[in-house]
């Protein structure tokens, strides 16, 4: 009975902290959200959903860090996401969290590791989209993957194939379809509109690209990554208008 009461109090305490953390996360107060989630983790260390929230905060903290601190934050995010996946392998958000974390680390690791991480982005994002076909961000991650791999230059692609065994096939058309699906499911996310616009620009569909980029750039920032996404979008729009 005493053990049950203690567990009940711990669960209630963790829930209250998580709610406060969620409010801080919505306000884009990453460090505040992280601190609250870390306190909740002490009470609920095996809560997969909480571990995903911790992975998100550590990942988003990378936007204000550099060098080894940025990489360390990314690796911590990945460790939390992997813990969540171990606890809940059939949870789409756990698969997606791992894919996102590998994606955030791509530019911070050596070439061979980058190829392996790219494969894992594709594998986990694909699994997430199958577990939850209505996950807009799973489709977004697949779109980003196709966009990046499809625009890899021929020399790099050849080296990747010869030295590292290559990557799954990718195309800008696939990227386009993924981003279109993401917009259908989550029209409120500016990232979907901007990345579809960038993809259409790569396909030389200039007018359609311009409209989507302008729409995305006019939307308010709601996520920590939005300023960086807008910077990429503005660069593409400037090239179309130049």
Image: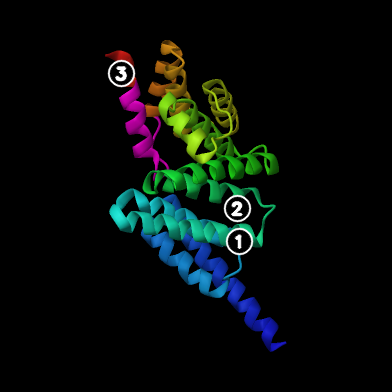
Q: Residue at x 54, y 43 (%)?
A: 121
Helix, strand or loop under label 3: helix
Residue 86 percent coordinates (x, y)? 63, 61
Which residue does the numbered mark 3 point to in the structure image?
239
**3 or 2: tag closer to the N-terminus:** 2
Is 228 situated above or below 152? below
Q: Nearer the viewer, residue 242 or 43?
A: 242
Q: Is residue 11 visible?
A: yes
Find the distance from the CA under tag 2 to the CA under tag 1. 8 Å
Q: Are marks 2 and 1 in contact (CB under 8 Å)?
A: yes
Find the distance from the CA under tag 3 to the CA under tag 2. 37 Å
Which numbered circle lies on residue 94? 2
Q: Is residue 110 magenta?
A: no
The magenta region covers 219-236
Q: Is residue 230 magenta?
A: yes
Find the distance from the CA under tag 1 to the CA under tag 3. 43 Å
Q: Is residue 188 visible?
A: no
**2 or 1: tag closer to the N-terminus:** 1
- Is the residue marked by circle 2 packed among few (<14), some (14-19), or many (20+) residues within 10 Å? many
Which residue does the numbered mark 1 point to in the structure image?
48
Q: Residue at x 38, y 59 (%)?
A: 72
């Amino acid at each position: 009975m005493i053990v049950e009461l203690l567990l009940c109090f711990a669960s209630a305490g963790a829930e209250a902290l998580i709610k406060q953390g969620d409010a801080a996360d919505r306000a884009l107060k990453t460090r505040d959200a992280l601190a609250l989630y870390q306190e909740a983790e002490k009470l609920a260390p095996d809560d997969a959903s909480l571990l995903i929230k911790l992975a998100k905060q550590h990942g988003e903290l990378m936007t204000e860090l550099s060098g080894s601190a940025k990489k360390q934050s990314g690796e911590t995010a990945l460790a939390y996401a992997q813990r969540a996946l171990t606890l809940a392998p059939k949870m789409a958000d756990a698969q997606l969290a791992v894919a996102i974390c590998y994606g955030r680390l791509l530019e911070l690791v050596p070439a061979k590791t980058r190829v392996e991480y790219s494969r894992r982005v594709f594998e986990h994002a694909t699994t997430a989209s199958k577990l939850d076909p209505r996950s807009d961000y799973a489709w977004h991650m697949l779109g980003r993957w196709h966009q990046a791999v499809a625009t890899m230059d021929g020399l790099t692609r050849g080296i990747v194939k010869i030295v590292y065994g290559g990557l799954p096939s990718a195309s800008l058309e696939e990227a386009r379809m993924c981003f279109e699906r993401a917009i259908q499911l989550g029209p409120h996310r500016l990232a979907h509109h901007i990345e579809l616009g960038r993809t259409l620009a790569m396909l030389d569909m200039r007018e359609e690209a311009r409209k989507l980029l302008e729409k995305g750039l006019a939307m308010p920032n709601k996520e920590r990554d939005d300023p960086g996404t807008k910077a990429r979008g503005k660069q593409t729009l400037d090239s179309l208008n130049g």
